[in-house]
Image: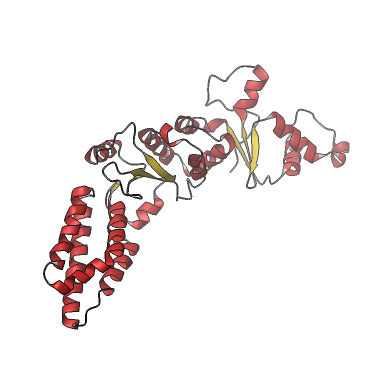
């Protein structure tokens, strides 16, 4: 069980105080059992109005046993919050994921519940996942697959953390969750090396749509990555040393070169960035500029560069 749910349950149960300690202990036991039954109900059948109705009826049954038992209604706010948090936790696909599995998921998408008007009531999809299972999950919860109300999208995994900021800039109405699931399915199949390149490519190209995110997985061979480049000066030195700059310099002038200017000018004419000590360039972009045409093969890579990680 989620640690937060455990603490919330403990607070509710231990908050029940009656003068008669025997009656207090029995009431605490009954309430704890009712909360546990509701958690089991959610784990097996999910949330929704019917599940919530069963939750409150369990507590109403306890309150009706003895007049003193109505004291549990003094904890209505805590109980109500317990229900909403627990319902959100168990209303997810794939179901019954552990905290560790949730934290390792590449992407978390929160979807507003269509069967609830309560603020903060949502369903959660952890991507990537089985597409057919996700469709069934949507159907079971009455969600329109093409027009669902997407709330938060975030990536807690180190492998995909840079994507959270990208999603913050995307209009929610333009995001197809099934297309997004396909993007993360593709990403998961990449080697660890290519996953690192993908994160850098995302920061370089700043895709505006989910489709562009997906297209980027097939564009990775055109991305040049060079470690150990922290600034324009180091880039200039790297270019001259490896004879990658447009001009070749004789050895006697090398000590007098303005490497910062060389690096800056190169970056201005190439679609490139320096990202956390890594130089990243889309080599296909400069080829387009030189030919005046768009590249017909996104997987084509310039022979002038060696990909280094």
Q: Quadrant of the C terminus?
A: top right
Residue 199 x %, y %: 53, 41
Judge whether residue 75 can be spotted in this image.
yes
Residue sitting nearer the eye, 162 or 165: 165
Residue 222 x %, y %: 57, 30
Residue 43 image-quadrant placement: bottom left
Q: Is residue 300 left or right of residue 22?
A: right
Vertical relation: 6 (above or below) 129: below
Residue 248 x %, y %: 80, 30
Coloring applied to the structure: secondary structure
Judge whether residue 44 can be spotted in this image.
no
Q: Residue furthest left?
A: 65
Q: Is residue 151 left or right of residue 204?
A: left
Q: Residue furthest front?
A: 67
Q: Is residue 138 left or right of residue 184?
A: left
Vertical relation: 225 (above or below) 67: above
Residue drawn at x 54%, y 40% as measured from the top left: 197
Q: How many marks?
A: 0
Residue 186 image-quadrant placement: top left
Residue sitting nearer the eye, 257 or 97: 97
Residue 237 x %, y %: 76, 41
Residue drawn at x 63%, y 47% as measured from the top left: 276
Residue sitting nearer the eye, 241 or 297: 297
Residue drawn at x 53%, y 22% as measured from the top left: 297
Q: Quadrant of the N terminus?
A: bottom left
Residue sitting nearer the eye, 132 or 84: 84
């Amino acid at each position: 069980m989620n640690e937060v749910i455990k603490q919330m349950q403990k607070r509710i149960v231990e908050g029940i105080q009656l003068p008669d300690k025997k009656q207090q202990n029995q009431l605490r036991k009954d309430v704890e059992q009712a909360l546990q039954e509701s958690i089991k109900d959610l784990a097996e059948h999910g949330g929704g109005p019917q599940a919530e109705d069963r939750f409150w009826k369990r507590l109403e049954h306890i309150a009706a046993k003895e007049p003193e038992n109505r004291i549990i209604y003094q904890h209505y706010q805590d109980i109500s919050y317990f229900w909403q948090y627990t319902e959100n936790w168990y209303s997810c696909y794939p179901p019954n994921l552990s905290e560790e599995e949730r934290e390792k998921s590449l992407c978390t998408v929160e979807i507003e519940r269509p069967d609830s008007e309560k603020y903060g009531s949502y369903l959660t999809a952890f991507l990537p996942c089985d597409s057919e299972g996700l469709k069934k999950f949507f159907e079971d919860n009455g969600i329109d697959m093409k027009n669902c109300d997407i709330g938060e999208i975030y990536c807690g995994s180190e492998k995909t953390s840079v994507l959270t900021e990208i999603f913050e800039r995307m209009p929610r109405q333009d995001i197809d969750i099934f297309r997004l699931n396909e993007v993360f399915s593709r990403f998961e199949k990449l080697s660890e090396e290519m996953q690192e390149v993908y994160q850098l490519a995302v920061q370089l190209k700043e895709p505006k749509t989910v489709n562009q995110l997906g297209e980027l997985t097939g564009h990775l061979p055109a991305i040049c990555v060079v470690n150990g480049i922290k600034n324009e000066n180091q880039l200039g030195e790297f270019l001259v040393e490896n004879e990658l700059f447009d001009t070749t310099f004789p050895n006697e002038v090398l000590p007098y070169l303005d490497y910062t200017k060389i690096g800056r000018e190169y970056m201005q004419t190439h679609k490139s960035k320096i990202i956390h000590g890594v130089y990243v360039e889309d080599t296909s972009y400069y080829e387009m500029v030189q030919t005046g045409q768009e590249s017909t093969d996104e997987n084509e890579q310039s022979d002038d560069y060696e990909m280094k990680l």
